[in-house]
Image (cartoon, rainbow, N blue to C red):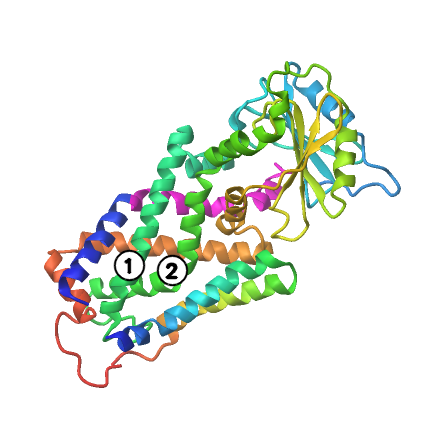
Amino acid sequence: MKSRNHHTFRIPAMIALASLVGLISALIGDGIFDAVSWTAFVAVLGVILWALFFRAPHA
Amino acid sequence: MRRTTIKAWFLIHKWSSLICTAFLLLLFVTGLPLIFWEEIGHATGATPEVEPAPAGMARANVDVLIDKALAQYPGDVPLFFGWDDHSPSVYVNTGARPDTPPPEMHTVVLHEYTGEILPAAQFNEGVMFFLYRLHTDLFAGLAGTLFLGAMALLFAMAIVSGVVLYAPFMRKVPFGTFRTDRNHRLAWLDLHNLLGIVTVAWALVVGITGAINTLAGPLEQAWQAEQLAEFTDQYRDAPAPTQFSSLDAAIEKARAAEPAMTPAFVSFPGTGYSGEHHYGVFMHGDTPLTERLYRPVLVDVETGEITARPQLPDYMTVLLLSQPLHFGDYGGWPLKVLWALLDLITIAVLISGIYLWTKRGSTENRINEIEAGGSNGEQPSAGTS
């Protein structure tokens, strides 16, 4: 059961981590730190586009 | 996960969501334009375009600026004086009494160098302030603010219980599953799970920092009562000051005392920020992080001398850092656009949640659905994931 949960939350955990990087980076500085934030959130939102429009149909 | 455990979390998710959803919709809808308050102000002319400082000209004397502002509102007293970080302009808040609340304040915006009065709209009038009141206190003052804080905590509870339920539901279903070929309910359920799990960290941070922000008033009062009282204790029995020394000179002393920082704003005595006998010159740094972490320099209004430079207590630091993480105003316009998209997705999570509730059937069926990953109890064949 534990390993299954681990599997279920592997991608969500990576997304949450990217979100936290996005939230914190722009707070630390401007310039490159802002760009890291934007990239992180674009990646997070990209996951939704991928799942809704590009993911191979579930058999 | 045991069936009774799933049922308990399902009921937590259902009821915490049901209670807060209508208010969360209001918050996320009104919050959307508030993200762009600054840009909307420039686009509508409510915020003046400020000419750069003429070459070689020194800053105007702050005392003169204050007098100019007061001449606009005869009978008012000065409350706050502050600097715009993005243009050479300053603002003066005035009001009938030192403790005038923000909705009743008057504001004059002036050029920091030429001293010219700039044509700025009052911050506490118009559509944006109306939305701000809906978003922050429902026009009900502190009670309204604390109520919205409670709704934000229920939102956090709904998010956490949603994540817990994600585990049994997704046990047999691969990440990102979106099934549109069976029935409407399943498509909405997959969408609810997908949008919810992808935005979970952002939504949790915005929700919790929003709840913290609802405590701003009480926390500032606590800070005033506990810490500032220490520094202004010797003035306890002193009558209210009648002589006001130069604020311009006080600001220069504060600049000299904190050379690595710049002044953000000044509070006048009686406003709740610096006791009854001091100017509070609030200095700040210049990074997105340090520009929120103020260092107050307290200047005795009668003698014009600095009497204290207290550290902000931790709870004020937490409050001040909660503000950008809630507003999304610290990473330029691209971050604001991303904030708006995440806001819209959260609205979709709320609406899909309402749809799922209207098509709910019995609780037992819902538990079956969660246990089976939405496949109505049929055993998925090997290799589906």
Marks 2 and 1 sit apart, C-alpha to C-alpha, by: 9 Å
Chain letter of the residue carrying label 2: B
Residue B35 located within the stretch drawn in magenta: yes
Label 2–label 1 contact, CB within 8 A: yes
Residue visible at 24% across and 73% down in the picture: B171
Whether residue B249 is visible: yes
Quick one: quadrant of the C terminus of chain B? bottom left
Q: Earlier in the sequence, mark 2 or mark 1?
A: 1
Residue visible at 34% across and 80% down in the picture: A56
Q: Which residues are the magenta region?
A: B20-47
Residue visible at 36% across and 74% down in the picture: A10
Viewer-proximal residue, B125 or B328?
Answer: B328
> Secondary structure beneath disc 1?
helix
Amino acid identity at mark 1? Gly
The single residue placed furthest to the right in the displayed view is: B56
Task: Name the residue carrying label 1.
Answer: B162
As drawn, the label of residue B140 is none
Residue visible at 63% across and 21% down in the picture: B235
The crowd level at tag 1 (other Cα within 10 Å; few <14, some 14-19, many 20+) is many
Q: In this view, does B189 lie above or below B208?
A: below
Task: Name the residue carrying label 2.
Answer: B200
Whether residue B124 is visible: no
Image coords of residue B334 (percent x, y): 56, 58
